[in-house]
Image (cartoon, rainbow, N blue to C red):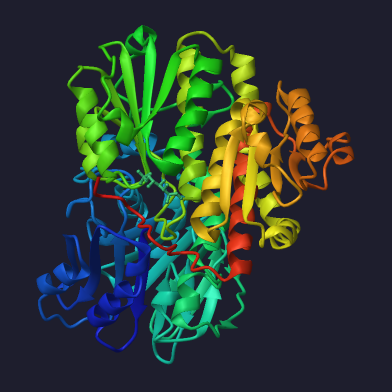
Amino acid sequence: MCGIVAYAGEKQATSILVDALKRLEYRGYDSSGLAVLTDKGLEVYKTEGQITNLETKLPKIESSCGIGHTRWATQGAPTTINAHPHVSGNIAVVHNGIIENYQELYDELKSEGYKFVSETDTEVLAHLAHMYYKGDLVDAVIKGLKKVRGTYAAAFICGDSKQVVAARKDSPLIVGIGKGENFLASDVTALLKYTRDIVYMHDLEIASMTSDKIDFFDFDGNPVQEHTESIEWNVETAEKSGYPHFMIKEIHEQATSVHDTMMGRISELTGEVMLGEIKLSNEDIMKLDRIEIIACGTSYNAGLLGKYLFEALAGIHADVDISSEFRYANPVLCESTLLVAISQSGETADTIAATKEAKTYNCRTLAITNVVGTTLSREVESIIYTRAGHEIGVAATKTFTSQLIVLYLLAIHFARINKRLDVDRSKRLLVQMKQLPGIIQQILNNKELIKKQAVRFSKARDYFFLGRSLNYPIALEGALKLKEISYIHAEGYAAGELKHGPLALISKDTPVVALATRASTYDKMLNNIKEVKARGAPVMAIACADDTEIQKYVDAVIRVPVTDELLYPVLSSVVLQLLAYYSAEDLGCPIDKPRNLAKSVTVE
Ligand code: M6R
């Protein structure tokens, strides 16, 4: 995940910026850079890879004002050219976030004569500030950003004065107040060594920072009063934004990550999904007669929902295979098959090998992944990035819900082209999708209820998760999450399978989580709940907020806000992540690094 730092003071800016960037390394990055003001004017240094590469490149320079960045690529490869800062004339900018109307701004700036050198959306910010700069950087930044749709935390400097101008919208940015020096960062961790007096900037706010002064403005240029807070956190707590584990921090980030995954890809006004990154023409899509999904673990569970969506919405037959099985099977693929490889890391050995195997059949290939520039991305024709941000906890959480979102988008896109989804239904679905971040936040606000249930059953030896149709993959994911971090044995089942064996295991000692949100199979699910209740199992249901029936049959209900029937899997996933987390926490497990597991499985 990208990181921003900035400094204005009397000390050596380069060493402070490099040190502060190193404190953001834990967030993950693929390149870094800085821009400083020296006697010669603006100087910019950037490199791929480790911050030590940047250090090696830096000459001995005298400077007391500058901006720095660690980049985690989301648009454009992780190269030196794409690394920040980006420059236009004597203005440099570092940026976290996504510029939604990049193409529009790019075309406009091109027609004004601006030349683009990188593949990043950030470069438009540098040119916009340059276009409006008439000696007042605050004014130029405001005018430029008023044209931008999207999210940003951005810091600008100009060769003319020792001043940093910063702005934020939906991406964190903090100012650190020192004595005769001031700081800026996207994450408090970067600044703890230097100051504990912090101002958290608000959305649509501008800060102008010099060595002895910080002023805040709104987007009309009016002064804004801000309060300084004193931070007590140590570095470890700060890295987790005050949460005890990365996993729970990442669970809480989902309102934002789901929003970022959708950003610029949805038009609820026209009912269209825009996926310019896929290299399949409408004719190519109409010719597809089969989708083969390959993935491992959590990504495989996302793939199972993908199968449901491709078939239900787009009318394209889909299969899902575990990569380690697929690579040694005898797959039947041809030119009209689309292979969809799903991998958060893009480095899972089995998924890469399975993709290579699939390519020998000349099928079309597409990857859904979270990390730019990985081995998997080099193997496929099209890539859709999930934009969930760097995930540190071994258990996949925010990357899973972002994978689900991409699968919804892809299925809707195919369905529109195949004329299987009319405009009105598509618009309604997209409107509901746009509301998911807010709904996820409501679930997170109710986490204490989920915690109570988790603690109640944390001493259970076995757990069962039941779901039908589109809830079945989420039952599997709920079980995987629980066993992975709490070491409680858990099984996910298609509820209709119970009678075919597993019912023999159900007793008063086996808590059952029933995914009973609105679906065409709801009544069948109620019957399955009655089956397990009759065997004495305590049942916890995940149900819709307006369900007045369910409480008659279960011991506890965790309610999720009402949405489109197709979208409940996203909501239930968040509930099950919290259930797993609080169970593991109650048992004192090493949540972020479960035994025997690694974040990325790069060996067979
Ligand atoms: O990076 P990938 O998505 O390819 O990883 C696949 C699995 O190893 C991964 O999803 C694993 O199951 C998670 N740790 C589960 O939380």
Residue 254 coordinates in the image, percent (x, y): 55, 50
Viewer-proximal residue among 106 and 581: 581
Q: Quadrant of residue 594?
A: bottom left
What residue is rendered at 28% in x and 15% in y? 333
Most distant residue in the front direction = 504
> Split into 4 quadrants, where in the image is the C terminus?
top left
Count of marks overlaid on the render: 0
Residue 136: tell me if it is visible: no
What residue is rendered at 42% in x and 42% in y? 297
Q: Is residue 368 above or below residue 33?
A: above
Left/right placement of residue 231 relative to residue 81 reads right
Residue 128: tell me if it is visible: yes
Q: Is residue 111 above or below residue 259?
A: above
Q: Is residue 230 above or below residue 150?
A: below
> Split into 4 quadrants, where in the image is the N terminus?
bottom left
Residue 66 coordinates in the image, percent (x, y): 29, 73
Viewer-proximal residue among 478 and 483: 483
What residue is rendered at 29% in x and 14% in y? 332
What residue is rendered at 42% in x and 52% in y? 389
Q: Is residue 495 above or below residue 50?
A: above
Residue 62 coordinates in the image, percent (x, y): 17, 83
Residue 481 coordinates in the image, percent (x, y): 53, 50
